[in-house]
Image (cartoon, grey):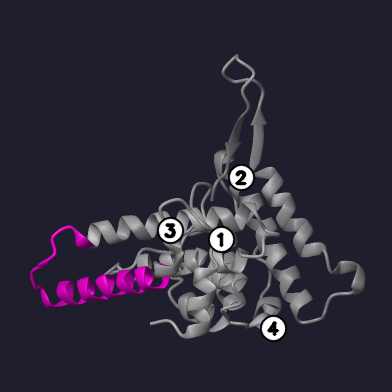
Amino acid sequence: MFDPETVDLIRRAPPLEGLDLAALPQILTDAFATVVAARIRLRTRSPDPEGTEVAETLTLLTRLAATHEIYVALMPDRDNRAAAAFVAASAHQARRLARVGAQPASRISATSISSEISAALLFLIAEAYPDAAEVAKRIVINDDAVGSTERALLLALRKLSEGRLGDILSDRLPEAAATAPEDRALEVLLDLLLRGVRALARQLRNDAAADDLSVARQLFLRVKALCIDELADPFGDGRAAYSVFSG
């Protein structure tokens, strides 16, 4: 299902123990085929002749997505970061296709990010812009399930993935919502992310002044710093430990 240039990109993904990079394009192709076939069987209520094949495929996709996404996040300067991002995004996309029926709302929480959001951003990192725009269509926003800031951020990320930079900037920032004390930290982080996406849109449109070109990066690095807190010797043996808002 991949063209020759994409096959070459996938094969340049980080070498991981037990993963055959030469076979990785075919592994992803087979995973997509398994997921699509399972969707057809569910819709037609046909029996599954392979038994646990779908479950095993989803486990593989989850591992590929998580491992390569971590690589992208922790090693931003590596030459094969784009390849890792494309593999992670493709795995997320295949996992998302496995859902049939009513789709859960897309979320950005303290502990997780919906797979369709991760896929869209990872495709952008891989410079696979048509793929990012396509997967962004699956970002489902349920106004009853999210607050105003999270909703605005989800919309901004969808528009960013679709290249609608002007629409991001024309949207008004949401008013601060009253939240429970335990939710205020997350609300602040979401607001910083939203402002960062807006700053990035201005930068990509060349609307930012020369001294404002690092604003988006500074905001995202601030969010990252606020999401990680080192705990002082929690085990009493000198080992380091961290409290992390992984989402």
**Type of the residue with mark 4:** Gly
State how far apart marks 1 and 3 are (Cα). Answer: 27 Å
Residue 166: mark in rendering: 4
Task: Identify the residue at image location x=45%, y=60%.
Answer: 114
- Above or below 42: residue 190: above
Residue 150: mark in rendering: 1
What stretch of residues is rendered in magenta? 24-53
Image coords of residue 21 (percent x, y): 46, 64
Tag 2 residue: 184
First in sequence, mark 4 or 1: give its number: 1
State how far apart marks 4 and 2 are (Cα). Answer: 29 Å
Q: Nearer the viewer, mark 4 or mark 2?
A: 4
Residue 64: mark in rendering: 3
- Horizontally, residue 17 falls left or right of residue 247, namely left
Crowdedness near tag 2: few (<14), some (14–19) or many (≥20) residues, C-alpha within 10 Å:
few
**Type of the residue with mark 1:** Glu
User: Foreground residue, 43 or 180?
Assistant: 43
Task: Identify the residue at image location x=36%, y=73%.
Answer: 26
Q: Is residue 112 magenta?
A: no
